Image (tube, helix red, strand yellow):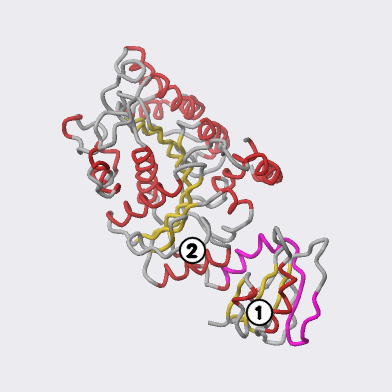
Amino acid sequence: MSTALSWLLDGIAEVPANGARVVEMTLDSREVRSGGLFLALAGGRAHGLKFAADAAARGASAVLWEPAADAVPPALPGHVFAAPVPGLRFLTGRIADRFFGWPSSNLRITGITGTNGKTTCAYLLAQCLERLGAAAAYIGTIGFGRPAQLTQPTHTTPDAINVHRILAQFRSSGVKDVAMEVSSHALDQGRIGGVRFHTAAFTNLTPRSSGLSRQHGELRRSQGEVAAAA
Amino acid sequence: MANYGAAKAKLLLLPDLKHIVLNVGDAFGRQFAQGYAGHAPLTAVWVGAANRAGWQSARCASQRSVRGRWASPSSSTQLRQAGSRDALDGAVQRGKFGDRDRVPAVAGHHAGPGCAGPSAMRRGAGRMEVVNVGAVHTGAGTPAPCIRARRTPARCIRARVRNPSPWSTMRTPLTRWPRCWPPRASTVWERCGAYSAAAATAIRANGR
Protein backbone atom coordinates (compact mmCIF):
# COMPACT_ATOMS: atom_id res chain seq x y z
CA MET A 1 0.00 0.00 0.00
CA SER A 2 1.40 3.38 -0.93
CA THR A 3 -0.22 6.77 -0.79
CA ALA A 4 0.65 10.06 -2.44
CA LEU A 5 2.12 12.37 0.16
CA SER A 6 0.40 15.40 -1.35
CA TRP A 7 -3.00 13.70 -1.01
CA LEU A 8 -2.26 12.45 2.46
CA LEU A 9 -1.29 15.87 3.74
CA ASP A 10 -3.83 17.88 1.78
CA GLY A 11 -4.92 20.77 3.98
CA ILE A 12 -2.33 19.87 6.59
CA ALA A 13 1.04 20.74 5.06
CA GLU A 14 2.34 22.18 1.80
CA VAL A 15 3.91 19.35 -0.14
CA PRO A 16 5.92 19.89 -3.36
CA ALA A 17 4.24 18.25 -6.36
CA ASN A 18 6.98 15.72 -6.97
CA GLY A 19 4.87 12.60 -6.77
CA ALA A 20 6.39 11.47 -3.49
CA ARG A 21 4.59 8.54 -1.91
CA VAL A 22 4.68 6.92 1.49
CA VAL A 23 4.24 3.23 2.18
CA GLU A 24 3.93 3.32 5.95
CA MET A 25 3.56 5.79 8.78
CA THR A 26 4.80 5.57 12.33
CA LEU A 27 5.50 7.53 15.50
CA ASP A 28 8.44 5.31 16.39
CA SER A 29 11.68 5.92 14.50
CA ARG A 30 12.74 2.32 15.14
CA GLU A 31 9.82 1.10 13.07
CA VAL A 32 10.52 3.29 10.05
CA ARG A 33 10.85 1.41 6.78
CA SER A 34 11.97 2.59 3.37
CA GLY A 35 9.44 5.03 2.03
CA GLY A 36 7.84 5.58 5.42
CA LEU A 37 6.42 8.71 6.99
CA PHE A 38 7.81 9.53 10.43
CA LEU A 39 5.79 11.81 12.69
CA ALA A 40 7.87 13.42 15.43
CA LEU A 41 5.76 14.49 18.39
CA ALA A 42 6.80 16.25 21.56
CA GLY A 43 6.99 13.59 24.23
CA GLY A 44 7.20 13.65 27.99
CA ARG A 45 10.92 12.92 28.01
CA ALA A 46 12.14 13.96 24.56
CA HIS A 47 10.90 15.38 21.30
CA GLY A 48 10.60 12.94 18.46
CA LEU A 49 12.73 15.25 16.32
CA LYS A 50 15.71 13.91 18.20
CA PHE A 51 15.20 10.69 16.28
CA ALA A 52 14.42 12.21 12.87
CA ALA A 53 17.93 11.63 11.56
CA ASP A 54 17.67 7.99 12.59
CA ALA A 55 14.35 7.73 10.80
CA ALA A 56 15.85 9.24 7.66
CA ALA A 57 18.74 6.79 7.86
CA ARG A 58 16.22 3.96 7.97
CA GLY A 59 14.67 5.20 4.74
CA ALA A 60 11.93 7.60 5.75
CA SER A 61 10.73 9.59 2.77
CA ALA A 62 8.99 12.25 4.86
CA VAL A 63 9.23 13.64 8.38
CA LEU A 64 6.58 15.81 9.98
CA TRP A 65 7.22 17.36 13.34
CA GLU A 66 5.29 19.15 16.01
CA PRO A 67 6.74 22.62 16.67
CA ALA A 68 7.88 23.11 20.22
CA ALA A 69 10.10 25.54 22.08
CA ASP A 70 12.97 23.07 22.21
CA ALA A 71 12.44 21.62 18.75
CA VAL A 72 15.31 22.34 16.40
CA PRO A 73 14.66 21.42 12.76
CA PRO A 74 17.00 18.58 11.89
CA ALA A 75 19.44 18.45 9.04
CA LEU A 76 17.98 15.78 6.79
CA PRO A 77 18.96 14.50 3.34
CA GLY A 78 17.50 16.50 0.47
CA HIS A 79 15.21 13.73 -0.74
CA VAL A 80 13.41 13.60 2.61
CA PHE A 81 10.42 15.90 2.78
CA ALA A 82 10.29 17.60 6.19
CA ALA A 83 7.80 20.10 7.51
CA PRO A 84 6.58 21.44 10.82
CA VAL A 85 2.86 20.91 11.46
CA PRO A 86 1.30 22.82 14.35
CA GLY A 87 -1.04 20.59 16.33
CA LEU A 88 0.38 17.47 14.71
CA ARG A 89 -0.55 15.39 17.77
CA PHE A 90 -4.21 15.99 17.09
CA LEU A 91 -3.87 15.68 13.31
CA THR A 92 -2.11 12.33 13.47
CA GLY A 93 -5.40 10.48 13.72
CA ARG A 94 -6.80 12.24 10.69
CA ILE A 95 -3.68 11.50 8.66
CA ALA A 96 -3.81 7.85 9.72
CA ASP A 97 -7.51 7.72 8.90
CA ARG A 98 -6.72 8.80 5.34
CA PHE A 99 -3.73 6.53 5.05
CA PHE A 100 -5.65 3.43 6.03
CA GLY A 101 -8.69 4.32 3.93
CA TRP A 102 -11.15 5.58 6.59
CA PRO A 103 -11.52 2.22 8.32
CA SER A 104 -13.82 3.51 11.07
CA SER A 105 -16.42 4.54 8.51
CA ASN A 106 -16.99 0.86 7.74
CA LEU A 107 -17.30 -0.19 11.37
CA ARG A 108 -19.75 0.48 14.16
CA ILE A 109 -17.49 1.53 16.99
CA THR A 110 -18.59 1.89 20.59
CA GLY A 111 -16.24 3.86 22.80
CA ILE A 112 -16.46 3.22 26.53
CA THR A 113 -15.03 5.73 28.95
CA GLY A 114 -15.11 6.18 32.72
CA THR A 115 -12.88 5.59 35.71
CA ASN A 116 -13.83 1.97 36.38
CA GLY A 117 -15.34 -0.80 34.33
CA LYS A 118 -14.12 0.12 30.87
CA THR A 119 -12.37 -3.16 30.26
CA THR A 120 -15.21 -5.33 31.52
CA CYS A 121 -17.87 -3.36 29.70
CA ALA A 122 -16.00 -3.31 26.43
CA TYR A 123 -15.12 -7.00 26.57
CA LEU A 124 -18.65 -8.00 27.55
CA LEU A 125 -20.04 -5.80 24.82
CA ALA A 126 -17.87 -7.51 22.24
CA GLN A 127 -19.04 -10.87 23.56
CA CYS A 128 -22.67 -9.74 23.54
CA LEU A 129 -22.41 -8.63 19.95
CA GLU A 130 -20.72 -11.86 18.92
CA ARG A 131 -23.53 -13.83 20.54
CA LEU A 132 -26.02 -11.68 18.71
CA GLY A 133 -24.43 -12.84 15.49
CA ALA A 134 -22.32 -9.81 14.73
CA ALA A 135 -18.65 -10.07 13.92
CA ALA A 136 -17.31 -8.05 16.82
CA ALA A 137 -13.90 -7.12 18.10
CA TYR A 138 -12.43 -5.49 21.18
CA ILE A 139 -9.68 -2.92 21.72
CA GLY A 140 -8.45 -2.18 25.22
CA THR A 141 -6.28 -3.04 28.18
CA ILE A 142 -6.32 -6.78 27.72
CA GLY A 143 -5.60 -6.71 24.01
CA PHE A 144 -7.29 -6.26 20.69
CA GLY A 145 -9.02 -8.54 18.28
CA ARG A 146 -11.95 -10.93 18.32
CA PRO A 147 -12.87 -11.73 21.95
CA ALA A 148 -11.54 -15.27 21.71
CA GLN A 149 -8.34 -14.32 19.94
CA LEU A 150 -6.86 -11.25 21.57
CA THR A 151 -3.46 -9.87 20.72
CA GLN A 152 -1.42 -8.37 23.54
CA PRO A 153 -1.55 -4.57 23.70
CA THR A 154 0.87 -1.87 24.75
CA HIS A 155 -1.65 0.73 25.93
CA THR A 156 -5.31 0.78 26.98
CA THR A 157 -5.91 2.84 23.89
CA PRO A 158 -3.19 2.41 21.26
CA ASP A 159 -1.58 5.46 19.64
CA ALA A 160 -3.52 7.21 16.92
CA ILE A 161 -1.78 5.42 14.05
CA ASN A 162 -2.13 1.98 15.58
CA VAL A 163 -5.80 2.59 16.34
CA HIS A 164 -6.48 3.09 12.65
CA ARG A 165 -4.15 0.27 11.69
CA ILE A 166 -6.03 -2.10 13.97
CA LEU A 167 -9.37 -0.86 12.68
CA ALA A 168 -8.18 -1.44 9.13
CA GLN A 169 -7.22 -5.00 10.08
CA PHE A 170 -10.65 -5.51 11.61
CA ARG A 171 -12.32 -4.22 8.48
CA SER A 172 -10.35 -6.48 6.22
CA SER A 173 -11.14 -9.48 8.43
CA GLY A 174 -14.86 -8.88 8.21
CA VAL A 175 -15.46 -7.33 11.62
CA LYS A 176 -18.53 -5.08 11.75
CA ASP A 177 -18.70 -3.97 15.39
CA VAL A 178 -15.93 -2.81 17.67
CA ALA A 179 -16.03 -2.23 21.43
CA MET A 180 -13.22 0.06 22.43
CA GLU A 181 -11.94 1.30 25.75
CA VAL A 182 -11.19 5.00 25.67
CA SER A 183 -9.11 6.30 28.54
CA SER A 184 -9.00 9.94 29.51
CA HIS A 185 -5.33 10.00 28.57
CA ALA A 186 -6.23 8.80 25.11
CA LEU A 187 -8.82 11.52 24.80
CA ASP A 188 -6.44 14.16 26.04
CA GLN A 189 -3.62 13.03 23.80
CA GLY A 190 -5.71 12.79 20.65
CA ARG A 191 -5.23 9.03 20.28
CA ILE A 192 -8.76 8.60 18.99
CA GLY A 193 -8.45 11.39 16.43
CA GLY A 194 -10.21 10.56 13.18
CA VAL A 195 -12.16 7.65 14.67
CA ARG A 196 -15.88 7.81 13.85
CA PHE A 197 -17.68 6.49 16.91
CA HIS A 198 -21.19 5.15 16.55
CA THR A 199 -21.96 4.94 20.29
CA ALA A 200 -20.29 6.39 23.35
CA ALA A 201 -20.84 4.87 26.78
CA PHE A 202 -19.93 6.28 30.16
CA THR A 203 -19.52 4.06 33.22
CA ASN A 204 -18.63 6.24 36.20
CA LEU A 205 -16.35 8.92 37.47
CA THR A 206 -14.46 8.55 40.72
CA PRO A 207 -11.26 10.12 41.99
CA ARG A 208 -8.30 7.97 41.22
CA SER A 209 -6.05 7.28 44.15
CA SER A 210 -2.83 8.03 42.37
CA GLY A 211 -1.86 10.88 40.20
CA LEU A 212 -5.17 12.68 40.32
CA SER A 213 -3.60 16.00 41.19
CA ARG A 214 -1.22 15.61 38.32
CA GLN A 215 -4.08 14.68 36.03
CA HIS A 216 -5.95 17.77 37.13
CA GLY A 217 -3.06 19.87 36.05
CA GLU A 218 -2.61 18.10 32.78
CA LEU A 219 -6.29 18.06 31.99
CA ARG A 220 -7.06 21.65 32.89
CA ARG A 221 -6.78 22.53 29.25
CA SER A 222 -9.38 19.88 28.41
CA GLN A 223 -12.07 21.67 30.32
CA GLY A 224 -11.78 24.72 28.14
CA GLU A 225 -11.87 22.62 24.99
CA VAL A 226 -14.97 20.75 26.07
CA ALA A 227 -16.69 23.91 27.19
CA ALA A 228 -15.96 25.42 23.81
CA ALA A 229 -17.28 22.35 22.03
CA ALA A 230 -20.47 22.33 24.11
CA MET B 1 -12.42 16.25 39.46
CA ALA B 2 -14.32 18.51 37.09
CA ASN B 3 -11.34 18.58 34.76
CA TYR B 4 -11.01 14.83 34.91
CA GLY B 5 -14.69 14.56 34.02
CA ALA B 6 -14.28 17.04 31.22
CA ALA B 7 -11.65 14.80 29.68
CA LYS B 8 -14.06 11.87 29.82
CA ALA B 9 -16.83 14.02 28.38
CA LYS B 10 -14.82 14.59 25.23
CA LEU B 11 -15.90 11.19 23.99
CA LEU B 12 -19.54 11.91 24.73
CA LEU B 13 -19.37 15.23 22.90
CA LEU B 14 -18.06 13.90 19.62
CA PRO B 15 -20.26 15.40 16.93
CA ASP B 16 -21.36 12.38 14.91
CA LEU B 17 -22.42 9.98 17.65
CA LYS B 18 -25.49 7.89 16.89
CA HIS B 19 -26.17 7.00 20.51
CA ILE B 20 -24.94 7.64 24.04
CA VAL B 21 -25.23 5.20 26.92
CA LEU B 22 -24.89 6.85 30.33
CA ASN B 23 -24.79 5.54 33.86
CA VAL B 24 -27.15 7.92 35.65
CA GLY B 25 -26.40 6.16 38.90
CA ASP B 26 -23.25 8.25 38.78
CA ALA B 27 -23.37 11.95 39.62
CA PHE B 28 -21.37 12.92 36.57
CA GLY B 29 -23.61 10.83 34.32
CA ARG B 30 -26.70 12.54 35.69
CA GLN B 31 -25.11 15.94 35.33
CA PHE B 32 -24.14 15.21 31.77
CA ALA B 33 -27.60 13.90 30.88
CA GLN B 34 -29.23 16.99 32.26
CA GLY B 35 -26.98 19.36 30.39
CA TYR B 36 -26.63 17.46 27.16
CA ALA B 37 -27.76 19.53 24.18
CA GLY B 38 -26.65 17.32 21.32
CA HIS B 39 -28.83 15.28 19.01
CA ALA B 40 -27.74 11.74 19.85
CA PRO B 41 -30.36 9.65 21.66
CA LEU B 42 -29.44 8.85 25.24
CA THR B 43 -29.91 5.58 27.04
CA ALA B 44 -29.66 6.30 30.74
CA VAL B 45 -28.78 3.12 32.57
CA TRP B 46 -29.15 2.92 36.29
CA VAL B 47 -27.99 -0.14 38.13
CA GLY B 48 -29.10 -0.69 41.64
CA ALA B 49 -32.06 -0.85 43.90
CA ALA B 50 -35.39 0.08 42.41
CA ASN B 51 -36.11 2.36 45.32
CA ARG B 52 -37.06 5.94 45.71
CA ALA B 53 -33.50 7.20 45.52
CA GLY B 54 -32.91 5.30 42.32
CA TRP B 55 -36.04 6.51 40.66
CA GLN B 56 -35.29 10.03 41.77
CA SER B 57 -31.90 9.75 40.12
CA ALA B 58 -33.36 8.48 36.89
CA ARG B 59 -36.11 11.03 36.99
CA CYS B 60 -33.57 13.71 37.65
CA ALA B 61 -31.76 12.75 34.48
CA SER B 62 -34.90 12.86 32.36
CA GLN B 63 -36.86 15.52 34.17
CA ARG B 64 -36.28 18.36 31.80
CA SER B 65 -37.21 16.43 28.70
CA VAL B 66 -40.25 14.83 30.23
CA ARG B 67 -41.49 18.14 31.47
CA GLY B 68 -41.04 19.65 28.03
CA ARG B 69 -43.00 16.88 26.38
CA TRP B 70 -46.05 17.29 28.54
CA ALA B 71 -47.09 20.30 26.52
CA SER B 72 -48.19 18.05 23.67
CA PRO B 73 -51.31 15.91 24.20
CA SER B 74 -50.01 13.18 21.94
CA SER B 75 -46.70 13.11 23.73
CA SER B 76 -48.53 13.02 26.98
CA THR B 77 -50.41 9.94 25.86
CA GLN B 78 -47.23 8.31 24.72
CA LEU B 79 -45.62 9.01 28.02
CA ARG B 80 -48.50 7.53 29.92
CA GLN B 81 -48.33 4.42 27.81
CA ALA B 82 -44.61 4.07 28.29
CA GLY B 83 -44.62 4.82 31.97
CA SER B 84 -44.20 8.48 32.66
CA ARG B 85 -42.26 10.27 35.28
CA ASP B 86 -45.46 10.95 37.16
CA ALA B 87 -46.40 7.30 36.96
CA LEU B 88 -43.05 6.37 38.38
CA ASP B 89 -43.47 8.90 41.14
CA GLY B 90 -46.88 7.56 41.88
CA ALA B 91 -45.52 4.07 42.14
CA VAL B 92 -42.90 5.23 44.56
CA GLN B 93 -45.46 7.10 46.58
CA ARG B 94 -47.70 4.06 46.76
CA GLY B 95 -44.79 2.10 48.06
CA LYS B 96 -44.85 -0.34 45.18
CA PHE B 97 -41.11 -0.44 45.07
CA GLY B 98 -40.67 -0.70 48.76
CA ASP B 99 -38.11 1.30 50.54
CA ARG B 100 -34.38 1.31 50.68
CA ASP B 101 -32.85 -1.92 49.52
CA ARG B 102 -35.63 -4.34 50.32
CA VAL B 103 -36.86 -4.46 46.77
CA PRO B 104 -37.27 -7.97 45.44
CA ALA B 105 -36.74 -7.44 41.74
CA VAL B 106 -36.06 -5.08 38.92
CA ALA B 107 -38.95 -2.77 39.14
CA GLY B 108 -39.58 -1.20 35.85
CA HIS B 109 -38.56 0.19 32.56
CA HIS B 110 -39.20 3.76 31.69
CA ALA B 111 -39.03 4.14 27.96
CA GLY B 112 -40.81 7.38 27.48
CA PRO B 113 -39.92 9.57 24.55
CA GLY B 114 -38.05 12.51 25.80
CA CYS B 115 -35.32 14.87 24.88
CA ALA B 116 -31.91 15.20 26.24
CA GLY B 117 -31.82 18.93 26.47
CA PRO B 118 -33.35 22.19 25.38
CA SER B 119 -31.75 22.46 21.97
CA ALA B 120 -32.42 18.83 21.17
CA MET B 121 -35.98 19.33 22.26
CA ARG B 122 -36.43 22.24 19.92
CA ARG B 123 -35.16 20.17 17.05
CA GLY B 124 -37.11 17.19 18.15
CA ALA B 125 -34.04 15.13 17.53
CA GLY B 126 -33.15 13.76 20.90
CA ARG B 127 -34.84 11.12 22.92
CA MET B 128 -34.02 9.45 26.13
CA GLU B 129 -34.64 6.02 27.49
CA VAL B 130 -34.17 5.37 31.16
CA VAL B 131 -33.51 1.80 32.11
CA ASN B 132 -33.27 0.36 35.58
CA VAL B 133 -31.27 -2.79 35.89
CA GLY B 134 -30.43 -4.42 39.12
CA ALA B 135 -32.24 -6.59 41.55
CA VAL B 136 -30.85 -5.62 44.87
CA HIS B 137 -31.90 -6.44 48.36
CA THR B 138 -29.24 -8.06 50.41
CA GLY B 139 -26.33 -5.71 50.16
CA ALA B 140 -24.11 -8.66 50.92
CA GLY B 141 -22.49 -8.89 47.53
CA THR B 142 -22.94 -12.64 47.20
CA PRO B 143 -21.28 -13.81 44.02
CA ALA B 144 -23.70 -14.77 41.31
CA PRO B 145 -24.03 -18.50 40.69
CA CYS B 146 -22.65 -18.12 37.21
CA ILE B 147 -19.57 -16.43 38.54
CA ARG B 148 -19.13 -19.01 41.29
CA ALA B 149 -19.32 -21.65 38.62
CA ARG B 150 -16.62 -19.84 36.67
CA ARG B 151 -18.70 -19.58 33.59
CA THR B 152 -17.96 -16.82 31.19
CA PRO B 153 -19.62 -13.59 32.32
CA ALA B 154 -21.27 -13.20 28.95
CA ARG B 155 -23.45 -16.16 29.75
CA CYS B 156 -24.92 -14.16 32.58
CA ILE B 157 -26.42 -11.66 30.26
CA ARG B 158 -27.17 -13.98 27.38
CA ALA B 159 -30.80 -14.11 28.28
CA ARG B 160 -30.91 -10.37 28.23
CA VAL B 161 -29.53 -9.75 24.82
CA ARG B 162 -31.96 -11.71 22.74
CA ASN B 163 -33.73 -9.81 20.04
CA PRO B 164 -35.29 -7.39 19.97
CA SER B 165 -34.18 -5.94 23.25
CA PRO B 166 -32.44 -7.31 26.29
CA TRP B 167 -34.76 -5.19 28.39
CA SER B 168 -37.84 -6.93 27.13
CA THR B 169 -37.41 -9.51 29.85
CA MET B 170 -37.35 -6.98 32.61
CA ARG B 171 -40.92 -7.53 33.67
CA THR B 172 -40.52 -11.26 33.70
CA PRO B 173 -41.36 -12.65 37.13
CA LEU B 174 -38.35 -13.26 39.23
CA THR B 175 -38.82 -17.00 39.29
CA ARG B 176 -38.36 -17.17 35.55
CA TRP B 177 -35.19 -15.20 35.45
CA PRO B 178 -31.87 -16.72 34.55
CA ARG B 179 -30.09 -18.19 37.52
CA CYS B 180 -27.33 -15.70 37.26
CA TRP B 181 -29.61 -12.73 37.95
CA PRO B 182 -30.88 -13.49 41.44
CA PRO B 183 -32.11 -10.72 43.69
CA ARG B 184 -29.07 -9.63 45.62
CA ALA B 185 -26.48 -6.92 45.62
CA SER B 186 -25.41 -6.09 42.12
CA THR B 187 -21.86 -7.04 41.37
CA VAL B 188 -19.42 -5.31 39.14
CA TRP B 189 -20.16 -7.98 36.56
CA GLU B 190 -23.81 -7.12 36.62
CA ARG B 191 -23.17 -3.44 36.34
CA CYS B 192 -20.80 -3.87 33.47
CA GLY B 193 -23.12 -6.39 31.88
CA ALA B 194 -25.93 -3.91 32.10
CA TYR B 195 -23.95 -1.14 30.48
CA SER B 196 -22.71 -3.49 27.81
CA ALA B 197 -26.15 -4.86 27.08
CA ALA B 198 -27.54 -1.35 26.91
CA ALA B 199 -24.84 -0.42 24.47
CA ALA B 200 -25.52 -3.55 22.43
CA THR B 201 -29.18 -2.61 22.29
CA ALA B 202 -28.33 0.89 21.23
CA ILE B 203 -26.05 -0.36 18.50
CA ARG B 204 -28.67 -2.70 17.12
CA ALA B 205 -31.45 -0.15 17.39
CA ASN B 206 -29.45 2.57 15.72
CA GLY B 207 -27.59 0.58 13.12
CA ARG B 208 -26.56 2.34 9.99
Chain hosting mark 2: A
**How many labels were placed on the picture?**
2
Name the residue that disc number 1 marks. Answer: A5
Q: Which mark is residue A105?
A: 2
| Residue placed most toward the observer, A52 or B16 | A52
| Residue placed most toward the observer, B106 or A230 | B106
Point out the stretch of residues depicted in magenta: A74-98
- Picture coordinates of residue B177, whole percent (x, y): 20, 35
Chain hosting mark 1: A
Amino acid under disc 1: Leu
Name which quarter of the figure residue B191 lies in: top left
Q: Secondary structure at mark 1?
A: helix
Please give the name of the residue rendered at 76% of the width and 74% of the height, measured from the top-left corner.
Answer: A83
Residue A128 painted magenta: no
Quadrant where the C terminus of chain A is found in the figure: top right
Locate residue A55 relative to residue B153 in the image: left or right.
right
Please give the name of the residue rendered at 50% of the width and 27% of the height, measured from the top-left corner.
Answer: B68
